[in-house]
Image: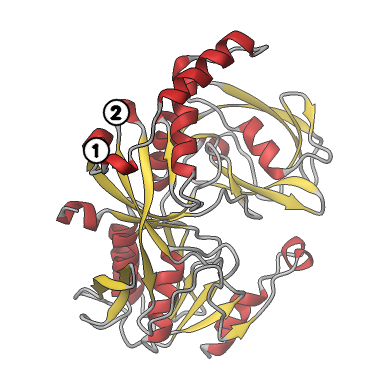
Amino acid sequence: MSKLDDIKKILLKPWIIIPVLVVFMGGSFLAGDLAHGHFTNPLAAKVTASDQPDFSSLNDLYALMKSKFDGSITAQAALDGARKGLVAAGGDPYTVYMDATEAKSLADSLGGKLSGIGAEIGTKNGLITIIAPIKDTPASRAGLLAGDVIGKINGEDTTNMSVDTAVSKIRGDKGTKVTLHIGRVGADPFDVTITRDDIVVPSVNWSLKNSDVAYIEVTRFGDDTTTLIQQAATELKSQGAKKVILDLRNDGGGYLSAGQAVASQFMSAGKTVVSERTNGKTTNTLVAQSGGQLIGLPMVVLINGGSASASEIVAGALHDNKVAQLVGEKSFGKGSVQEIDNLNGGAQLKVTVAHWYTPNGININKEGITPDVEVKLTTDDYNANRDPQLDKALDLLK
């Protein structure tokens, strides 16, 4: 693998995540560990004669389907299905074949570019609710407010509708329209028609709490994360930050290089961030880079069951290097590394190439990382706008 491939290695998210907050911009993010690769010709792979499968039976099977199947199947659909099946035969849920559409969706997710109205939603007290419109998006320009209840989507009642179903109905291609029936405290219900657009969502948000606590939320480890974490550190330091809370809750992963950049803001240069092992042998070790601006400050990292891959690597690195305490709930538990190889027609192969280990030599695959201080966040907390995990982090930093 080239140096560029190694730098672009990704911690892709392992599952389709529909967290309590869902962004109305084209769907939920993929999760896991991954690496961008070069163009690959599958026929160039070194396969011994004894290992070469006889694929003639697939032609026979396709012919039988065409003659017997009470439905339709195209040659392209058959090829894509065969490729997915071949890759799935490895038995690894994180090694997958992605067709061109799926590959583009993954790239858009990691780039933070999605299409929709630009609002976060969730269910509060059983109702589909706007959690927050994103600044300078169709939702904010249309006047939607936090707390607005979406009663109907294009005339369809949302009673008993799941969040993911609501997302699928509200999202759509740029230039198309969606009509929402809105309920708002102190106002009569009203309809608003919004034209969807491409939405670019920053992967890092930050603010200063209690006058000296730097609060940094990383929602994914994407294309913009390295630049934004540096900007966040610079601004917060200039504002007098003396303590840090890093919020990695519901962050399912992204680029390994972005995880390294985030950890480097809080760790001394040269300290181990993560090591990779293939067949039990260490093949690569990433260390903190120079230039960290928030090194040495008392720190708490927030994690939960939605924290996976790159989030777990950063949390594990900061914990094992005694930089931070972990607060919240046990993380997801994804300890493998994938790389992406580009195929003909825009398709891609995401394949597990290694397993990663924390600085203390721990692989958390399927086990997750247990926080130092366990704090639950319940549905009642959410409905009442309480965040006991954040409150505990602030209390520990007093």
Q: Is residue 147 visible?
A: yes
> Hey, which residue is sitting farthest top in the picture?
67
Q: Which of the marked residues, 2 or 1, is nearer the chain's N terminus?
A: 1
Q: Residue shown at 53%/28% (left/top)?
A: 196
Q: Is residue 348 left or right of residue 308?
A: left
Label 1 neighbour load within 10 Å: few <14, some 14-19, many 20+: some
State the image coordinates of residue 245 (x, y, percent, origin top left): 47, 76
Visible residue check, residue 265:
no
Amino acid type, residue under disc 1 in the picture? Thr
* Image location (x, y in percent) of residue 341: 29, 43
Q: With 322 as the anchor, is 327 left or right in this view?
A: right
Image vertical order of residue 240 relative to residue 201, above or below: below
Q: Residue furthest left?
A: 3
- Disc on res. 344: 2
SS at mark 2 in the image: helix
Toward the viewer: 220 or 38? 38
Location of residue 324 (image quadrant): bottom left
Question: As rendered, which of 50 and 262 lies closer to the eye?
Answer: 50
Which residue position holds label 1? Answer: 40
